Image (tube, grey):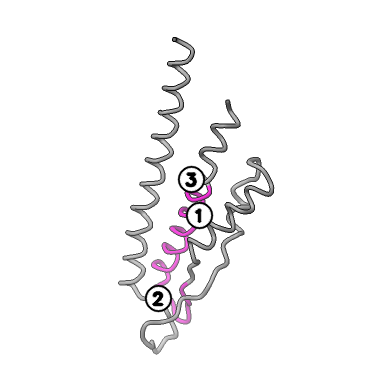
Amino acid sequence: MINRLTDALSFQTEALVLRSERQRLISSNIANADTPGYVARDFDFAQALREAAAGQAGRGADAGAAARRTSAVLRYSAPSQTNLDGNSVDMDRERAAFADNSVKYEATLRFINGSVRTMLDAMKSHNQG
């Protein structure tokens, strides 16, 4: 039963870890908006999730969050306009990415919570019935 629960939630767990890592990167970009020469970083979430899910299938459910986090290939964000100090942070883009990622992080948490509740209800019904 535990293995079924783990299998059912592994994809969402991967997504949650990657969303958290992406939020950390976006926050770092925002924090360094005034740092001369700072180049904003990000990663392709969909690609990182595909790679993490494929790796999860190959290594089992016992892999740690640090191993999943390294699957994301960090890229430098292209500046939307030239800046004299060499900083590539576009605050509008970063704020939008932060808000979008926050909403998706929250949705992933709600999905995991709902899945766990459904499985717990199913186990209670089976044991009580």
Horizontally, residue 37 falls left or right of residue 53, namely left
Distance (Cα) linking label 2 and label 3 = 30 Å
Where's the N terminus, which quadrant?
Answer: top right
To which residue does mark 2 refer?
89
- Specify which label sits upstream in the sequence, 1 or 3: 3
Within 10 angstroms of label 2, few (less than 14), some, or many (20 or more) residues?
A: many
To which residue does mark 1 refer?
18
Q: Nearer the viewer, residue 128 or 63?
A: 128
To which residue does mark 3 refer?
12
54 up-or-down from 81: above or below: above
Distance (Cα) linking label 1 and label 3 = 10 Å
Q: Nearer the viewer, residue 55 or 16?
A: 55
- Residue stretch in magenta: 14-40
Within 10 angstroms of label 1, few (less than 14), some, or many (20 or more) residues?
A: many
Three-letter residue code for mark 2: Val
Horizontally, residue 36 falls left or right of residue 95, namely right
